[in-house]
Amino acid sequence: MTIRIGVIGCGGRMGRLLLRTILEEEGCRLTGGVEQARSAEVGQDLGRLAGLEPVGLKSTSDARLLVEESDVVIEFTSPEATVHHAGLAAAAGRAHVIGTTGLSPSQKAAIARAAERAPIVLAANMSLGVTLLAALVEQVARSLDAGWDIEIVEMHHRMKVDAPSGTALLLGEAAATGRGAKLADLAQRARDGITGARKPGAIGFAALRGGDVVGEHRVLLASMGERIELAHVATDRAIFARGAVKSAQWAVGRKPGLYGIRDVLGLASSQERRSSFD
C-alpha cells in the first residue's frame, strides 16, 4: 500500500529533509507541501526544495487542501501553527505526525483533544537513539535513590528558539517517571546568582546554544564519589526525518488517539498507551 504524505512547513530545514526522505522512500507518495502565504518558498517545485530534480509539484499555502488530499501530514513548525493544523487533521480524520517543540500545556491539551478524532503521533524527538536513551534514563532513575542528583545538559544550533529543548524535557520526564513523580514538581530550569544549595530530588536543566550543532543531550546522575553519564549525539538531521516518515507510515489506519515514538517502535507499556500528557 502506498501512503500519501504531505509536509507542512516544507521550506524549513526539517521540511526539506522530509520532502527528500518521502520522495526516496519506497511505499510513500508525496502529495504536496505547504508554507506560510508570505514565504518565498510558496510556488517552488518540491523536488528542488528537497535538493533533487523537479517533481512537478509546487508548494502552496493551502494546509486544509493538503490535509484532505493526504493520508497523513507531517510537520515541524511553530506551536501555534501546529495546534491549528491538528484541528484541520482531526476534522478531516487524517493522521498527523508532530515534531514541533516548545508546546505549552494548553497547546498540548488542544492537541490531545484533536487526537480524540484522529491518530496523532507527537514526539519531541523522532530519533530511535533518543527513544532508547529515555527508556534507559527512566530505568536508571528508578534503580537509584534520591541521593543521586540528576542534571540534564543539552546543546543545539544558534537558531533554536526554545529552551530547554523538547528532548531535554522528554528525558526529564523519563527521570521523573522513574522516581514516581511529575517533572513539574522537580524541574529546576536555571540557576543564576546566589542560589543556595541544590534542592534535594531536583532535576536540573542547562541549555547551551552555538554554531550548527544538530543536537547533543547528556543526563548526569551524580552521587558522593561517583557519577553516571548517559548521552546521545545527533550529527545528521536526517535521522529525525526518517523517524517522522516511519511514524507516518505507522499512524495511517490507526484508531484516533495520542501516540508517541515508543508506540511506533513497540516500546510503550500498556500504561503508557492509556495515558497522554499525564
Image: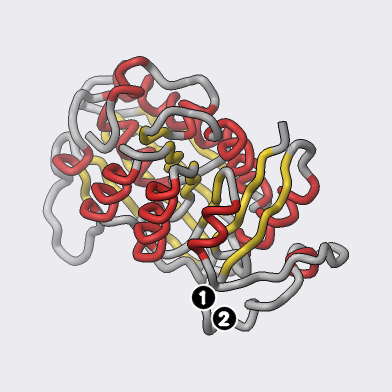
Hey, which quadrant is residue 123 in on the image? Answer: top left
**Mark number displayed over residue 154:** none
Q: Residue at x 48, y 28 (%)?
A: 254
- Depth check: 77 or 235 in front? 77
Residue 6 spot, x, y in % from top left: 61, 54
Residue topped by disc 2: 39
Q: For numbered disc 1, what is the local secondary structure?
A: loop
Q: x and y percent of residue 278 in the render?
A: 22, 34
Q: Nearer the viewer, residue 117 or 73?
A: 117
Which residue occupies the extreme right position in the image? 53
Q: Which residue is mark 1?
A: 36
Q: Quadrant of residue 3?
A: top right
Q: Is residue 148 left or right of residue 11?
A: left
Q: Are the two marked residues, 1 and 2, in contact with CB atoms closer than 8 angstroms? A: yes
Locate residue 158 relative to residue 53 in the image: left or right: left
Amino acid tagged 1: Gln
Q: Residue at x 41, y 33 (%)?
A: 259
